[in-house]
Image (spheres, rainbow, N blue to C red):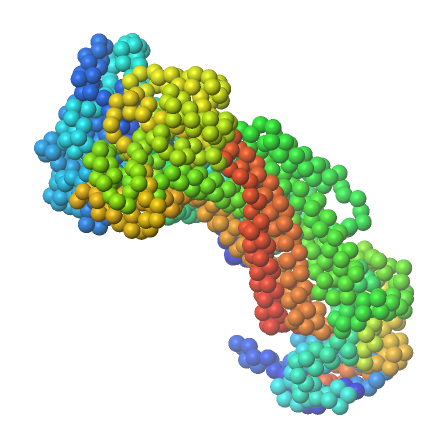
Amino acid sequence: MISLRTLFRFYRRHLRVQPLRELMAVVGVAAGVALLFAVQVANSSVTGAFEQVVHGVAGHATLEVAARSPEGFSQSIGEQIESTPGIKAAAPVLTQQVIVTGPKASKPLTLVGADERLTTLGGELISRFERYAEVSRRGLLVLTQPTAEALGVKRGNVVAIKIGERTERLALDAIVPDSQLGPLAESPLAATSLPVVQVLSRLPHRISRVLIEPSEGREAEVRRALDQRFGSTLNVRPVNAEVQLLSDAAKPEAQLTALFSAISLVVGIILAYNALLLASGERRAFIAYLVQLGTPDSSIIASLAFDALILGVLGSVLGLLAGDAISLLAYRAPPGYLTAAFPIGGQRIVSTETVLIALGAGLFAAFAAAALPAISLLRSNAIEPETERVVSLLRRPRFSESAVFGCGALLLCVAVVVSLLWTAATVVALVALAVGLVLCMPATVRFILKLARAASKRSGDPSVRLASGEMRTSPTRTVALLATGTIAVFLMVTISGAVADVQRAVRAGAEETGSNADLWIRPGGAENVYGTQPFAPTQTQHRLQQLPAVSSVLAYRESFLDLTDRRVWIIGIPPQAPNPIAESQLVKGSPSIAARHLREGGWAVISQTIATEHHVGLGEPFILPTPSGPASFRLAATISNYGWLPGTILLNADDYRRLWHTTSASQLAVTLEPGVPLAEGKLQVERALPAGSALGVQTTEERQQQVSTVLGSTLSRLDQTSAIVLIAAIATVIAMMISAVWQRRGRLDTLVSMGMSFVQLARLVFYESGCVLLAGCLIGVASGILGQYLIDSWLRHSTGSPIVFSPAWTLGLRTVLIAFAISIIAAVVAVLRTFGFRPKTAFSTE
Amino acid sequence: MLELRSARKYYSTDAGDIRAVDDISLTVHPGELVALFGPSGSGKTTLLLLAAGLLRPDLGEVRFENRDLGSLTKAEVLEYRRTKLGFIFQNFNLMPGMDAEENVALPLLLRSIDHREASKRALRALEDVGLLARAGHPPAKLSGGEQQRVSIARALVGEPKLILADEPTGNLDTETGDAVLELLSSLPRERDAAMILVTHDARVARYADRVLAMRDGTLVSYNHEAAEIGR
């Protein structure tokens, strides 16, 4: 058996002979691993870190009783909950959305108020906060180190806290260092004592939830008892229910991430395969040498496997490092739409599982990429000199070639049909589509070669004829180039096209929902995109109505409400609102009838996904769990998700006020008197707000812009990553073309000897690379637009977004231009190469 | 026709200058076949490259039809190679993705001759070398001798005034080599063209009008010993 030392020597030899090729293969695998790792980390971080926060706070608590309203429930109910038999320990908590401002910046945070009872639950996060916040019970604030650094505050400094419509001030008691919190240091959390939050939020004796640790073996009993007694007005559920709600909200993004990961792996294999192709001649010569020495097949296979192993390990390690950098630089910020409803920040959770998946994928990519050249080498007689294999266009395709094409075409058809008939399987179908495309490449190349041959026969341009000939001379390289271009463009067009469609839908929705007023007033800054933070509106409303420029001020009441498996957005629309339902978002029902019903009260408009899930038809009654108990509504119409993926429910704002027991508003919609310029009206409204008000005033256009920016960030990181894939593919294609020019230097020298000019030579390389890349781009654009259509349908189905399919032709045109640019680069390289023309490669006597 | 006047070409290396062509004067006339022998490194290829205008002499002149190649512009040198020269290589250097006819037509297409006319002339050239029936075959489907004959047809199709043949029999067996030499030796007189044939093959002496030998960059008188050295 061949020794490890010998295998190392062989590899060292390859490294010495073809360092660039080895580097390119490693980079190819690394690119796939990096993309896979980065998207996995980004995806698992969102729910992983939140889960850690929940457990870090809840400790041994397994149940919670949570309010259905942001204004919480009475502390006396909390005491009743705590006295339920079977509870070992319980801790009340009040959480509020605030904006903390320091000298350097402002940050939206979730302010957690608790007392010493929370520490008895043994939550790790709480004990760390507790250790650094001995004096916090006196009413001071505790922040994490990254938050304090971002705000530019130190212990003892006073920070401004915007809560509701007011701005309060609080001294900073302690900063919990990074080392104590690990990845959770990035969580947007601040802590202080329960009474302080109650005072700050003007919610005296109110709490948001009670965390419960049942006595051993009595969890079910406790839950039943709590459910019976409090279940009608409060949510009694496992403590990690919010993690499930977050997972549900992030599901479409998570599934697209999975799709992206799988296609990244395909890209990695193709890139590595391309690199390995560059030196197949050299490898062949080395194997011939081994065969001549009498080396057994098993040792040759061991040598090839060892090469693949080294390639896989190096590529994976490099990929992990690059992926880590990508996830740090590009994926740090969580999706904007999720931060509005869950306390998640830029924390990164890198689990062992994620690392192992990336490593495994890297090794798989390396072995898969090395397998084809290795099989070809082992099947042929390596001792015979390698002759250039020219594709014969006359012979019928071999059975194996037809079978590969058949499998690819079948996979393509099945992927499309499955995706159309069973929308939920779209993600898997798209991976199958990508694999199918790759399998169809050899036959496609054959077809392209036939076309090129037919065209060249009619052309008097020697460059055209030579380009056609060169493509036939190196069919494997042509297939690899075509596959690289196709898959990169496919991914780019599919993802970017779908992202653009989602963003367009969000913009359209924002435009329509914002058209009910000229100005919008609400707390919470830019992140409060769903307008779910309550504030006391009466004084402000009264002041504004006195302004001569103002025609009307309507109070919108909005919040998130947890149904069993989804956190829905509740919008209480004032009956006076001119257009209570955005028509573009309407799925079923008449807008005028639905608007009339909403104004009447007792009716609701709900997202189609929720209506379908609960089997509710138009006009039929359904029960909504509200803070005052189950309330019956009738379905007036169904709508899209209104920009909140888990779904939205529109109510009459008066119904909301009654059922939520609140006089608070979450937004004020101001309509100006006719003829009042918008800027002047805005100025008047801003001046009318009390000094130190935490409320912000936005014009409809500014609001639309904000909604568009925050909600549009959905999927946008995948958009950025697909651009990285395209760049990696471009780099590979350029490297391959440069290498191809180098490998055929003998032929090029012959042509120059015979009188071929630099212009003719440049044209030859341009036609050759242009033909392959253009074909790759066109196939990529066509399949990408198909992929975009399928993803749009899936997103429409799974999220209820009114996404309108708009083919990404502009993007397609851009990729074609990129192909054109690459071809020019290759041509320039060829000309530069022949500037250093050495005729000896054509002549052979010396 | 082709005249080298005290031509000199040295290559600089770390070990010092290599005198590839050292003060060589030579005239080759139309219809003449000049065989050039010499061991490896004697400067034969450099002499061919000088004649082809692919290299410029450090000193002296290379003149073709009384024009100094050193005084020509790049475009004129390109034109010279396209219209006046024909090349025959040891490795044939046929384009593998093109069939025999296309390979032969290539020099004409490089000169922007209409492709239909180029095709006609290519077929005629293939007929001249006895390969008309193989016109549609790619090089990989041709034997070594056939490939060299295609290569000869390609060199002749442009009706060159000077044919530069570099070891044309180097990759052929004896019988095929003889056939190729028979064909080559008839060309200069039939076409009123000059030919410089660089070789190690002693049989070539039988076919040549003039036999020269090179050693260390200089021309020496040919004898059988020189041929043996070359071999």
| Residue at 39% across, 44% down | A704
Asked if residue A186 is positioned above or below residue A84 in the image, the reply reads below
Asked if residue A512 is positioned above or below residue A647 in the image, the reply reads below
Residue nearest the viewer, comparing B8 with A392 = A392
Which corner quadrant holds the N terminus of chain A?
top right
Image side of residue A347 versus residue A319, left or right:
left
Asked if residue A754 is positioned above or below residue A633 in the image, the reply reads below
Residue A289 visible to an observer of this rendering = no
| Residue at 27% across, 14% down | A230
Asked if residue A633 is positioned above or below residue A6 in the image, the reply reads above
Q: Position of residue B101 (x, y in %)?
A: 83, 63
Q: Position of residue A616 (x, y in %)?
A: 47, 19
Which corner quadrant holds the C terminus of chain A?
bottom right
Image side of residue A480 versus residue A395, left or right:
left
Query: How many numbered tags mark residues here?
Result: 0
Residue nearest the viewer, comparing A802 with A54 = A802
| Residue at 34% across, 39% down | A529
Residue nearest the viewer, comparing B146 with B200 = B146
On the image, which quarter does residue A788 sit in? Answer: top right
Q: Position of residue A759 (x, y in %)?
A: 66, 70
On the image, which quarter does residue A509 sit in? Answer: top left
| Residue at 81% across, 49% down | A394
Q: Position of residue B202 (x, y in %)?
A: 80, 74
Residue A672 visible to an observer of this rendering = yes
Residue nearest the viewer, comparing A729 with A86 = A86
